[in-house]
Structures are given as structure tokens and as C-alpha cells.
Image (spheres, rainbow, N blue to C red):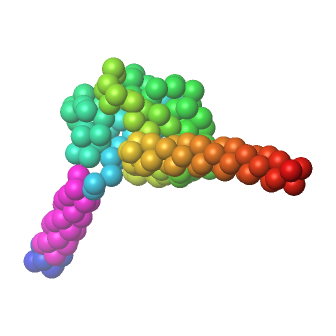
Amino acid sequence: EREQKTEALQRELEERARTEEALRVSQTKFAAIFDASPIAMSVSLVEGDVRTIDVNSAWSRVFGMERGVAMGTNGLRMGIWVDPAERSRCLEIVERTGEISNFKAWMRRGAHGAEIYCDISGRMVALGGERVLIMAFDDITEKHRYEENILQLNATLEHRVQERTRELTDAMGQLRAA
């Protein structure tokens, strides 16, 4: 009977070792995928206040801050939100719906850096009994500038067409009067 108990315990220990190894492999895969993502991402713990627990390399590149600077703080304290009210609005949407997508906001590279326009998406998830917010920040500054330029060009073109139409209408009126 003692041998049977020993064998059962040995099998249980082997199964536990396999399970722990599978967990380590899974965590390593997740970490590699998270860090390799070309989109800036953050993971934050939500417990009253929002506190950053991890950011990927793209986040560090986009916001101009090392990972260690972001850990344990949040975007408001880091000064990366140009308008703190936008951050509040973003978090209210996530709190109410559990997710957010296509939220546009002006942000800052570092506390005093250049302003960037970001398309923000995120989702609240439960991990180990804790509420965790996973956010993605896509820098669309150049795209936004191109869109603004196109809108300005369209407005200018529309104005020119209206002016030319007026000129042609006046010329037609003068021709009819002559």
C-alpha cells in the first residue's frame, strides 16, 4: 500500500511539473507576442485608480519612455494625455461597456514632448481575480494630418469652383445683355 501511495504521489508530481511547464511556455509565448506587437500596448491594474503593470517595446518607442518609468504609475501622472478630461472620458467608456475602440485623443511623447494623435482601443479583462485593462495606442498623427490637408484642399477647391461659377454666370449675363 505504501508503494501505491508513493507511485500515486510520483504521478501527481509529474503531472504538476508538466502543468507548470505548459504554463511557463504559455506565459513566455504571451510575453513574446505582447512585446513584439508593432502597436503600443499597456496592461494596467484597475483597483480604484488605474496603475500600469506592463508596457511593450512599441509603447516605449511611441511615448518616449522606458518601461520602468511607466510601471506602477499611470498616463495621467506620466503626463502623456494632453487633455486629462479625454482620459477620464476614455476610462468611463471602458468602465461602462468593458471595452473601447476607435477612441481618438491627443497624447504626448513624454511629459513635455511632441503631441501625437492616437486611435485607442482596449478591453477590461479579469485575470486571477483582478480587473486588468489592456490598451492599444495607434499613432495616427500622419494619417490625421493627411486627412486634415485633404479636407482643407477640398474646401479650397469648392471655394474656387463657386468663384469660377459666379464669374461664368456674370459673363453669361453680360453676353446676353449685349
Q: Main secondary structure of the magenta part?
A: helix
Q: Position of residue 138 (x, y in %)?
A: 39, 48
Q: Does 101 appear in magenta?
A: no
Q: In this rendered view, identify the residue nearer to me: 126 or 106.
A: 106
Q: In this rendered view, identify the residue nearer to me: 111 or 97.
A: 111
Indicate left or right for 8 with 83 as reference: left
Q: Position of residue 88 (x, y in %)?
A: 56, 31
Indicate left or right for 59 with 45 as reference: left
Can you name the residue that lies furthest to the right here? 177
Which residue is depicted at the point 50% across and 37% down? Answer: 105
Within the image, what quadrant is residue 115 found in? top left
Q: In this rendered view, identify the residue nearer to me: 11 or 143.
A: 143
Give the residues drawn in magenta, as a range.
10-36
Residue 163 visible, this angle: yes
Can you name the residue that lies furthest to the front here? 178
Q: Position of residue 87 (x, y in %)?
A: 52, 32
Indicate left or right for 72 with 127 as reference: left
Which residue is depicted at the point 16% across and 75% down? Answer: 11
Q: In this rendered view, identify the residue nearer to me: 16 or 115.
A: 115
Q: Position of residue 178 (x, y in %)?
A: 86, 50
